[in-house]
Amino acid sequence: MSKSFYVTTPIFYVNDAPHIGHAYTEVASDVLTRWHRQRGENTFLLTGTDEHGEKVLRSALGNHVSPKEWTDKLVTESWLPLLETIDIDNQDFIRTTEPRHKVAVQKFLQQLYDGGFIYQGSFEGNYCVGCEEYKNDGDLVLGTLEFAGVKVCAIHSKPVEQLNETNYFFKLSDFQQRLLDHYEQNPTFIQPESARNEVISFVRSGLSDLSISRSKERFDWGIDIPWDQNHITYVWFDALLNYITAIGYGVDDEKLNSLWPADVQVVGKDILRFHAVIWPAMLMAAELLPPKQVFGHGWLLVGGEKMSKSKLTGIAPTQITDIFGSDAFRYYFMKAIGFGSDGSFSWEDLSARYNSELANGFGNLASRTIAMVNRYFDGVVQAPGEYLEADLRVQRVAIEAVTGAEAAIDKVAIHDAIAKSWLLVDELNSYITQQEPWVLAKQESNNERLATVLYTALEGLRVLATLLNPITPKACKKLWGAIGESIGELDSQSVTNAASWGQLAPGVKLGELEALFPRVEEQ
């Protein structure tokens, strides 16, 4: 079984319903997976939910139900529907409460314990329930308002708890030099560069061993430590293992080897250290390869603050998709925010980009091109005549768009890939304006030139349908249904060869095209 291109999202905590910050991560991972599939590669996208830990337990108790009832309800009513809302084409969905995950986690733990990487010890420190993590003094800031003068978690803005426990520890400190060597030998392992520099600085400052269990005297919502039934597994140690438990670790070596190591693991920058420090160390201890790349994207900001339900800045994805549709959601968040940087969301910017870039730019280009073929040639694709410089320029821009977008995707620069693709949208709009096919149509002697202009525009649309299919799949499917079905399925079109000119066969009758991006009234 050949190696597939394997992309993972972090698995999301089910203490509440998802907001657009979660959807942002899902869409980015989906776009990467779809793009590689459009290259003709076998691909696999994993997402899922993290359902253990004290935070989930407290949320369940606060809603007067058991943790299992709470997680089942949220997964069924909120997290799985999210994938449909934003058109995520995942190949698996892992829940950490599933038997396949629990059994594999215990197998992994036992292997590390038997190998001497786990020992029992005591620890005292500042614990943030929101992060499910012990905090160093440098991770705390002075609170404001009701917590004024109190040290709080810099991420959740809530006081930490003082804990003193006897737990089991993973010898993370043993892997400090191995991790630094790995970062040096694999310079793109952590991206973007700012994230890489942050992690290297953190590891160089020294690593402490990691508490990987919690006494059942505190709470018992988790996976039992296999050699000590009085302890459950620390939620992060449990959760990180989903990336291999979902693909056959311990039960299906062939499937595991066909997918692991993951090609890109997409995470938010607030959980980067878990994935770029703890996770590869765990894998090294188990004699497994680390993932090829961990990409830490930035935060979505609302009013200058990170998207958060607890701070009442969370926006449900359906609040956007119900008005603008899923394609606009996917396009906006992938284009408007440099992937890897923080970005601010605003309704005004979303509305402006929808109207100018999607409805007027791409959508109107498609509708007026097909309308002119229908009007002047009864909807039949015409053979082009001799290409002039203006036509050849469109072909060159198509090549530039494809090669530029492909290079950007290899750098996980999704925003740049869209920007490169949009060069062709802008060029085609300019081309049609300058060539004035409506003027050419007034004289029969111009029919060959008119045919060449409209064929050039149709070929450009074919290229765009292939290029933008990973970004706006619904719109591209509509467009392909009108212009490209005679070539084959859209998903089977090679994005790498998209700019190879002349793939539309003359004589083919175009299909009907419904509006790709219907106009949205100001609200």
Image: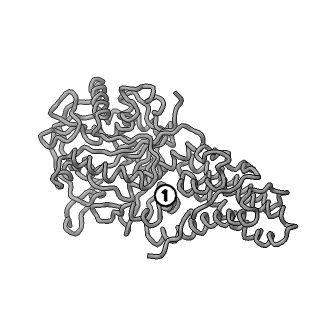
Residue drawn at (20%, 36%) of the image: 232
Vertical relation: 263 (above or below) 300: above
In the image, 516: left or right of 104? right
Q: Is residue 150 left or right of residue 337?
A: left
View extreme (bottom): residue? 522
Which residue is found at the position 23% from the left and 45% from the top?
A: 53
Residue closer to the observer: 144 or 520: 520
Image x and y of residue 507, in percent: 76, 52
Q: Residue furthest top?
A: 114
Q: What type is the residue that disc 1 sits on?
A: Arg
Q: Residue furthest left?
A: 217
**Seen in the image, is 222 located left or right of residue 199?**
left
Q: Which residue is mark 1?
A: 330
Image coords of residue 488 (percent x, y): 64, 45
Residue at the spot x=42%, y=64% of the render? Answer: 322
Q: Nearer the viewer, residue 139 or 1?
A: 1
Write down the quadrant of residue 395 in the picture. Answer: bottom right
Rendered location of residue 66, percent (x, y) = 17, 47
Residue at 17% across, 50% down: 65
Tell me how many marks there are. 1
Residue 388 lies, in percent from the top left, at 83, 60
- Regarding residue 376, the answer to whether it shows in the image is yes
Among the 4 quarters of the image, the one containing residue 374: bottom right
| Mark 1, secondary structure of its residue | helix
Q: Quadrant of the C terminus?
A: bottom left
